[in-house]
Each structure stands twice: as structure tokens, then as C-alpha cells.
Image: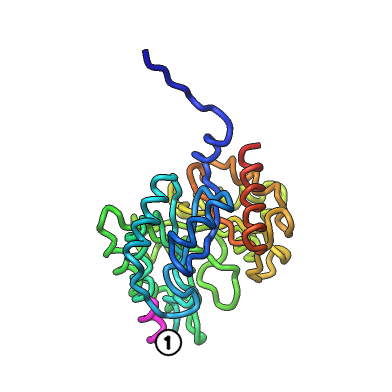
Amino acid sequence: MSTSTTITSGPLLGRARNPVGGHIPVAGGLARVGLPYAREMGAEAVQVFVANPRGWAMPPGNPRQDEEFRAACADEGLPVFVHAPYLINFGSHTGATAERSVESLRHSLRRGREIGARGVVVHTGSATGGRHRGEALAQVRERLLPLLDELTHPCDPRLLLEPTAGQGASLCSWVGDLGPYYEVLDHHPKLGVCLDTCHAFAAGHDLAGPGGMKQALDELVDVVGEGRLGLIHANDSKDVVGAHKDRHENIGSGHIGAEPFAELFIHPATAGVPLTIETPGGKEGHAADVARLKALRDG
């Protein structure tokens, strides 16, 4: 006679609701370097770069490392995400930058598929050169919508838009700014959101205030709809709310504090959504932040 056990609490249930992990280094090999780092930090989800984040080079990758990494992440149940290079800006007034942004993001999306990534994160950019916001968003549509339409393979990752901290002429920093961004991209089915808690706080969402995290997540659902949140960058902030400064701090050691992250874990919009940290401190600091988030989740 067979029996089955239903898990109603504990770490396995917590992991099923919100895998917690981090951005891992992969210089020297996705599998050779990245996997041991992920295991040592206790990661249940991972994010990687597949190119120099501050350059335009588009390396082809190593098929052997790709296969080993993809297989190990599948075996260990690790959701994988790719972060596209920081230079990408579809609102740039410079034609060369806009065109390079297309090719760079296409590369990240292709590499994401090759390593089994669930999503590719890209910053939402800014209107440079004194351009009007509407003109920059029109260019976002012109350059980015065709890339989304190329995502027809069953294993293609989703494109996850990450609002910024509000520096300069940011096209999208407040959660509400995602509305016009989604509109120019026709609410494409392959479009999702990566919410960075430090960015949202820096942009002006008071996540540390009473009910602040719930309010921001409620607004996110109102603006883009249910099921669009694909990843959370869980980062505390070195600076105060509304500072427009993208300076990450360890969980519980910054101006957001630990309690809002506990609030995040119980919101309906975050069910099943992985969290990855991008905090300082190296391997030991990363392991401590992952453990701290798991305790908030499972407690």
C-alpha cells in the first residue's frame, strides 16, 4: 500500500512559495565557478551575467559549461535568471547606443534560453539628450517590441523590466511608471517585471512605513495585472526613501529594515516568485543575507 505526505509548513513549503538566492559570479565558468558559489551561499535561485555588464561584448558561451550548469540547476530545482548589461538603454538619443542595446539584449535572451533561464532582467532606461519622455517611449516600442515578438520558442525566457532608482531622466522608477511602458509594448505576453526593493525605496515608495510594502505590491498588480511579477531583487538601502540613489545594503542593515521583507513574503502577488539578493559582503555576507531572508520567510 502506498502512502503520501503533504507538507504544510517548514523550509520545503517556504522554498516552494519563494525560492531565495542571489547573483553569483561566473567568470571562469558557469558550472565551474557559479555552482559552488551558489551552493555555499545556500541559494535556491540564481542570477548570472552572460556578458560583461559594463560593456557591449557578446561572448558565445561554452556549450559544455552551459549544459553542466543547466542540468545541475534543473536537478537541484534552482530557477535561473540572466541580468542583461547595464549599458542597454532603448530611450537613448544616440542611434549607436539604441542599436547596440537591441543586439546586446538579443544576445542575453538567446544565452538565457541556452542555459535554461526563466527570465532576463533589463533596466528600463532613461530619456537622454534632453528628449521628451513620450519620444523616448516611442523609441522603446520601435526597438523592443520586435525583440519580444522573436520570443516564440517554448524555452525562451520572459523579459523582466526592472524599474530604476529614479536617477536622471528615468523612464520608469515609480511602480506607476510601468503602466505607460507596458502600453507602448502592447502588454506583450512575454513581458514581466523584476522589482528591486532598493530601487523602489530610492524612487520614493516608503517600503519601511506601515503597510508600505503591501501598498507598493498592490499598486504593481493594479498597474500591470496579476502574474507579471517574475523576480524580486531583495536589497536593503544605504540611503533614505526618495534619495534616488542605487546603493544596496545587507538585509536588515539599511533604511528599509527586515520587517518589510517579512511583509513581502505573505503578499499574494509574490506567491511562487523567486528572490535574489544583490548585496555587499562577498560570499559570507551573501550567505548571511540568504539565511536572513529564509528565516523571515519560514518564520
Residue 134 appears in the rendering: no
Q: How is the image coloured?
A: rainbow
Q: Residue furthest top?
A: 1
Residue 60: image location, x then y, percent: 33, 72
Of residues 72 and 11, the one drawn nearer to the viewer in this rendering: 72
The kind of secondary structure the magenta stretch mainly shows is: helix
Of residues 10 and 104, the one drawn nearer to the viewer in this rendering: 10
Q: Is residue 111 magenta?
A: no
Of residues 145 and 270, the one drawn nearer to the viewer in this rendering: 270
Residue name at image x 46 percent, y 52 percent: 230
Residue type, mark 1 in image: Thr
Taking 293 as reference, is 99 left or right?
left
Number of marks in the rendered image? 1
Residue name at image x 60 percent, y 64 percent: 199
| Secondary structure of residue under mark 1 | loop
Residue 285 appears in the rendering: yes
When the figure is inspected, residue 32 is found, relative to residue 294, above or below; the finding is below
When the figure is inspected, residue 31 is found, relative to residue 258, above or below; the finding is below
**Residue position marked by numbered label 1 in the rendering:** 94
Q: Give the magenta part as a residue range.
A: 95-101
Residue name at image x 57 percent, y 59 percent: 196
Q: Quadrant of the N terminus?
A: top left
When the figure is inspected, residue 164 is found, relative to residue 225, above or below; the finding is below
Query: Which of the 4 image quarters holds residue 234?
Result: bottom right
Residue 14: image location, x then y, percent: 55, 38
Q: Quadrant of the C terminus?
A: top right
When the figure is inspected, residue 183 is found, relative to residue 13, above or below; the finding is below
Taking 202 as reference, is 161 left or right?
left
Residue 286: image location, x then y, percent: 63, 57
Taking 144 as reference, is 179 left or right?
right
Q: Is residue 96 magenta?
A: yes
Residue name at image x 44 percent, y 50 percent: 79
